[in-house]
Image (cartoon, rainbow, N blue to C red):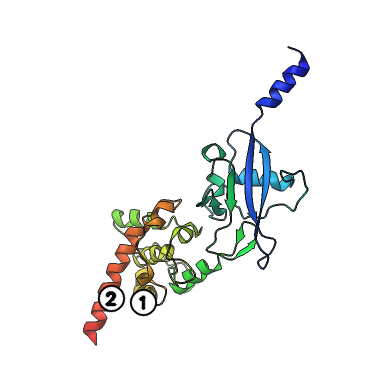
Amino acid sequence: MSEQTAQQETQKEKRTVKFIITRQDSPESEPYTEEFELEYRPNMTVNSSLMEIQRNPVNAKGEKVAPVCWEANCLEEVCGACSMVINGTPRQACTALVDNLEQPIRVEPMKTFPVMRDLAVNRERMFNTLKRVKAWVPIDGTYDLGPGPRMPEVDRQWRYELSKCMTCGVCLEACPNVNDRSDFFGPFAVAQVDLFNSHPTGAMNKQERVEALLDEGGLQECGNSQNCVQACPKGIPLTTAIARMNREGTKYLFKKWLSV
């Protein structure tokens, strides 16, 4: 076999990966799709593919275009920044292996949040909700308070599972009750209330957090579809946390009714 023939055979064997990316130039502009084709490499992820497109932003037509905009930070499914919809499923781009995805790979921004540009969305509503439910443990002053109170191991393990939340927004995107017709602030907030209410020091503000869950957009908006627990990339037991907080809310309302 001649060298030229060998090169031709090698060229035929080259695999490519096709992406169809939903883009949007600004928050006010209309979305559109653009196709990109990359040479296949082993262990490619959607995130690494977007980086390659960013380095050489040429679409499938051979046209030089603006680099695709998206958010990423840790690249190991810890920060939650690279959440997007990949082949119809909300997930993290950093752990979405190309080998496991059907082609062409369709990449879209999460529709639950306002799009800033391309795949980058504004998740401010999630952080505002965390403020609303007081998702923190308050301390008195800035001085050293010494070691925290001890707790049973079973409680510590439960709190550890809830603490895995990275505010990625995937549970909101998967939840059918998070939409334009509902004020539901999402499953993640309910789990965070459970997390901080089960903390020995955080329990001092337990009543305020439960009241926030019973306010507009709270627990009563949950339809128990259980999409959230299936979509959560960290495997957080969200539906269990919702059930626990429903029980706490019922107890709180009953006690309040008796005290009238």
Tell which of 198 and 213 is nearer to you.
Answer: 213
**Is residue 252 something that shows in the picture?**
yes
Along the horizontal axis of the image, is 112 left or right of 194? right
Q: Is residue 167 left or right of residue 224?
A: right
Q: Position of residue 44 (x, y in %)?
A: 60, 38
Q: Are marks 2 and 1 in contact (CB under 8 Å)?
A: yes
Query: Relative to 41, is 216 on the left or the right?
Result: left
Instruction: Describe the element under mark 2 as helix, strand or loop.
Output: helix
* Residue at 37% in and 67% down: 222
Q: Which mark is residue 52?
A: none
Quadrant, the N terminus:
top right
Q: Quadrant of residue 252?
A: bottom left
- The residue depicted at 24 percent of the width and 79 percent of the height is 255
User: Which residue is pictured at 74% across the width and 45% down the height?
Assistant: 58
Q: Furthest-bottom residue in view?
A: 260
The residue that mark 2 highlights is: 252
Q: Dot 2, how many residues are within 10 Å of its Cα: few (below 14), some (14-19), or many (20+)?
A: some
- Please say if 55 is above or below 181: above
Residue at numbered disc 1: 211
What percent of the width, then of the height, locates residue 132?
46, 74
Element type at marker 1?
helix
What amino acid does circle 1 point to?
Glu
